[in-house]
Amino acid sequence: MSYAPIAVFAYRRVDHLQRLLQSLEVCAEFSTTDVIIFVDGPKGEADYAEVAQVREFASSCKLPNVTIKISNTNKGLKRSICEGVTFVCSQYGRVIVMEDDLIASPSLLRYFNSALDRYKSDERVFSISGYIYDCPALRSINRALVLPITNSWGWATWQRAWSGFDPEELIDNETIKSPTFRNRFDINGFYPLASLLELSIERSVDSWFIHWYYYIFRCGGVTIYPPRRYVENHGMREGATHGSILNPFHLFVREQPEILDKDIQLPPTAVIDYWAMDVLKRCREVTVHRWISRAGRWKRKLLAQKRS
């Protein structure tokens, strides 16, 4: 098995990047895996010192399998991810994508590489996810799940899937406003994804993920998930990039099982596990995420009214 390269995206939190790399180094496959660290540039004077720390730490990595790519300008997450994934896919044909606020299970790389090999020719499978929302009904399952939704917290894909993706694809207003489209895109109320797509089109948020999901949705694609997460996300905690009064994720979702550290079975064919979507929709973590998303949308509306 040839190991897929890892694209790591970092910005201004050196402690996050350090923890991520330390967790990846525990994986048996890490030392023979090419790692490309993309460091975005500062937005201005306010974050210059923090970005400089990240640059200094990344540049100090003397591991022979690690390459550093530093941007002199601030691209933002959307452009950084899209350009970085495009570059790595064009060079290697596949990629594992990790943002700096993640922590990997020792079994993560084995899972990703096994799934990338298993589904490399399955045109329905567009990505492999390392994260899944915590759901007690799924914890004891020992096989991967096939779901009609994707996730951005530790994922992998192939050039065959990524090459057709255009983050600036135009989506007509009639589609966005269609109740039928919104219900299907939201997967019957699973999450207000259509609202996020609308905000991104309006440039109210800078999201690459929602456009990637729209592309997969339009193509009728699926994503492979573990029954329990192989990745821990620290980006939702207080003081992190996504933590705030209207995003108190760390207060409402505290106790979760340890990240998965064992191999799971990969189904031979990508048949959607609709029942898993039903139980995920009712779990506490997804419920909290839905509430946070709606609170954020109301906050943006109030701010827009004040500005007008």
Image (cartoon, rainbow, N blue to C red):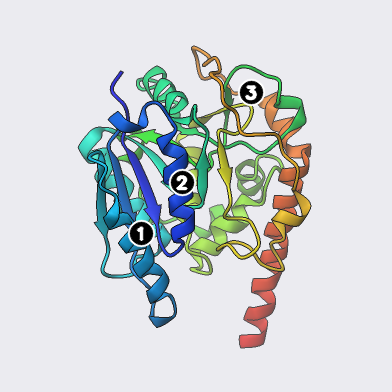
Q: Is residue 210 above or below residue 26?
A: below
Q: Nearer the viewer, mark 1 or mark 3?
A: 1
Q: Quadrant of the N terminus?
A: top left
Q: Which residue is mark 2?
A: 20
Q: Which residue is mark 1?
A: 79
Q: How dense is the environment of label 3, judged by Cα within 10 Å: few (below 14), some, or many (20 and up)?
A: few
- Residues 115 and 22: in front is 22
SS under mark 2: helix
Which mark sits nearer the N-terminus, 2 or 1?
A: 2
Q: Amino acid at mark 2?
A: Leu
Q: How far apart are the two marked residues, 2 and 3, measured between alpha carbons? A: 31 Å
- Residues 214 and 138: in front is 138
Q: Quadrant of residue 278?
A: top right
Q: Quadrant of residue 300?
A: bottom right
Q: Which residue is mark 3?
A: 273
Q: Residue at x 44, y 28 (%)?
A: 112
